[in-house]
Image (tube, coloured by chain):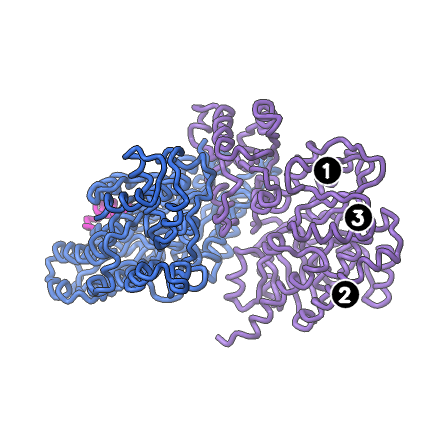
Amino acid sequence: MKLAVWTYEGPPHVGAMRVATAMKGVHYLLHAPQGDTYADLLFTMIERRGERPPVTYTTFQARDLGGDTADLFKDAARGAYERFLPQAMLVGASCTAELIQDDPGGLAKTLGLPIPVVPLELPSYQKKENWGASETFFQLVKRFAVKREGPAQGGAPRCNLLGPTALGFRHRDDVLEVTRLLGQLGFEVNVTAPLNATPADLARLGDADFNVVLYPEIAETAATWLEKNLGQPAIRTPPIGIGATRDFIAAVAALTGRDASALLHSMPSNQPWWSRSVDSTYLTGKRVFVFGDATHAIAAARIAREEMGFEVVGLGAYNREFAREVRAAAEHYGCPALITDDYLEVERTIADLQPELVLGTQMERHIAKRLNIACAVISAPAHVQDFPARYSPQMGFEGANVMFDTWVHPLVMGLEEHLLAMFRDDFEFNDHAGPSHLGHGGGKAVEPTVAVPPQAVTETVPATISWTSDAEAELIKIPFFVRGKARRNTEIFAERNGIFRIDVETIYDARSHFAR
Amino acid sequence: MTVLNLLARRAETAPAARPLPTEVLRQRGQREVFCGLTGIVWLHRKIQDAFFLVVGSRTCAHLIQSAAGVMVFAEPRFATAIMEERDLAGMADPNEELDRVVAQVLERRPDIRLLFLVGSCPSEVIKLDLSRAAARLSARHGPDLRVLNYSGSGIETTFTEGEDACLTAMVDLAPVETATAPHLVVVGSLPDIVEDQFRRLFSAMGLPRVDFFPPRRAADIPEIGPQTRFLLAQPFLGATSQKLEDRGAQPLRAPFPFGAEGTTAWLQAAADAFKISPAVFNSVVAPGRERAKRALARHRETLQGKSVFLFPDSQLEPSMARFLYEELDMRPIEVGTPYLNKELVSCEISRLPSGVVLSEGQDVDRQLDRCRAAKPDLTICGLGLANPLEREGLATKWSIELVFSPVHGFDQAGDLAGLFARPVTRHAMLGV
């Protein structure tokens, strides 16, 4: 057993729901007890979908367990087919149904439904949501995709975009942005899947010349199969950030023998200049902690370091499947890697590191809010406010613009940071006012407190170190957005130098010691 | 004035109260409802030194998190012991594993005085005996920590039945009665502010002693015995009610305290049991009742004559339908409930107009067909259905707010009506 307070990923059948809900003409028959329908609200509330997910739950109860849950399944399957008339049906079990071993795939076969039925085996007690989405997409691709007969049609080379699902972080807009980008390079998108694809569309996957793996967590398994069985090469560079978008364009150009130098030269994004303009000087060396799914976290770390001029002080991911890639990236940036799905461990790490900006999931947003640290969301799991009405991709040139704005917004603006430091003793113009562009409460100068009980926090500083009241008063004069760091650095300095009582001198000694 | 008098008086001015409809529509199919684990979301805020440990799967953890949503802000006093392959394959002793996880929880939260081991669908299916585990852990960590168990599994409980199961388990911890005179216990978790309002009213009537169950702290579980008179504040507490009766406590049956009328009738039941004089009762109740009526009048302008369709969710539906019909002049079309406890809600149902369809259980697809055909002015339903129905042009109210917000009593009557009026007003306002 594993103690979990909050989870980053749902069970694997929720991953299957993300694929089924993304597609058209697919229905998912889920053998599940009463209550598992909660998953519908993820789609209808968080993503604001105006249709129910295409899922029928058999809804068995305790009284059914002695009787025939298999008949219940068959009735539900027949009923769902007649009501929804899908082109294909996915059948599977949720965690409880897995235990009663009714074999949904076998049962569905006996019904002789006049449509393809794809059975899913998603081991709920071993695997999680992303794996479930990946496996479901792979099973669908394997079932429907057929190899192209004869030579390629004339005209522009074509590709498939693989991986976008329902409830994906900005998948809707990434698809538009990457489609536009490929169009500028002269390529047509043959099929985008699973988002908005039908089973018939999956049958046409083979018509493309190559595949683009937008989200490796979901599409890598399918892309590998297509490579092996249909001979389609894959582009595996998610174009998140200017550097990665350039790499993506170069990879596509190299694969297809096209000249992409015009697009690479023109660089239609504001982000590079916004980053070079003088106001952004104040972004230099800001300490950021990055956490999310591996793909988004690795991409964000690169943008943070190379395109924003931040210092990456920690990099992590909750999906162990991509731990190797995350560790390699962390090593590159010279920071520790954190591979965990334990929310409390992430919270402790952030509290210890005292970064100035957290780039994470909605969970890290809650942590950052508690610790009074600026935060922007870069990855699923996301909350309703991370599904904006406006066009807001993460990928491509526009994605780089979106991320510049989103990440800089929670920080104190450049010139303002300078003024706050200059006038920090002014009775009206001081840091208690907080950043001027964030409404009331946006930057209240509250001492960061960790909401977890003290014994849960890894203390890095012995409790024997104390502060004089003068030193405490001096610390308050330091702007709130660096106060946590100053406190921590001073204590570390004191510990290393055998100082047990921190006075004003210690603060300034520490400051000169740590000065960059 | 007794409840009966009140009903009789209404009968003169309102359409005749009728006997309980014998026809109850029962269909079998997909149920779009939460399981009993969801109750942890409000129970853990209510009992401030209790911790709820679900013994279940990743799905259970994901459910509570999805239902709790914004509550990530607080340090939660609930968690899930997620069973993994090795627990099921017999490679690990589930009892040893559970003991280890409980030790982890207690190390983190030494302030916990009451620990609930909450059974789930998978733990019930593999027949993990949580009552033995609770006894073992109580012996090990007691007497400062008491450990109880109940099942919030979807195969046994629907949404609010989780609270019923939790309170039923808690009755075991109620001290033996020492009182020699009747005393009142209000049963069902209420927001603290509502509890305080009721406490003031009972005290002004002159009731000697009032306790609330569940209490805010585990040590304050009221004593239960033959001198106990109890009022249910929630209609979904059938098993708790039975367990209290088994201890000799006497139930005071009444409509539930929603709106001006419901609250008056509910308070009246207590007043009658404690022989409070009509003059005292009226003087205590009148100000709150008038405030409630004034607050309702505003919303009645928006809602009167409008039709309403209730999907099953929390078992509060018969009470809500009564409130919407009687106090806001709405027209209920169908009143769905996951489970119809006739003994507890007959006084609500008997006050509904003729022609209302009463349905128990659910086949959600067929119920949606009926709802679409009826084109109600307002549909009260769960979060999974609300946006899809809005997209089809229907105004909806999420029923989950009825258990998450303070809605009981005189001073919340206006807020309760406001929950229903807001979507209707919004539909009228929007020009996009």
- The type of residue carrying mark 3 is Arg
- Name the element at disc 2: helix
Which residues, given as a range, are shown in magenta? A219-234
Magenta: main secondary structure:
helix
- Name the element at disc 3: loop
Report which residue position mark 3 lands on: B253
Query: Between residues A328 and A354, which one lies in front from this camera angle?
Result: A354
Chain B palette colour: purple
Give the image quarter of residue B325. Answer: bottom right
Q: Which residue is drawn at 53% across and 48% down?
A: A76
The mark lying in front, picked from 3 and 2, is 2
- Name the element at disc 1: loop
Give the image quarter of residue A165. Answer: bottom left
- The type of residue carrying mark 2 is Glu
Disc 3 or 1, which lies upstream in sequence? 1
Chain A palette colour: blue
Report which residue position mark 1 lands on: B222
Q: How far apart are marks 3 and 2 (CA)?
A: 24 Å
Q: Which residue is drawn at 44% across and 39% down?
A: A106
Disc 2 or 1, which lies upstream in sequence? 1
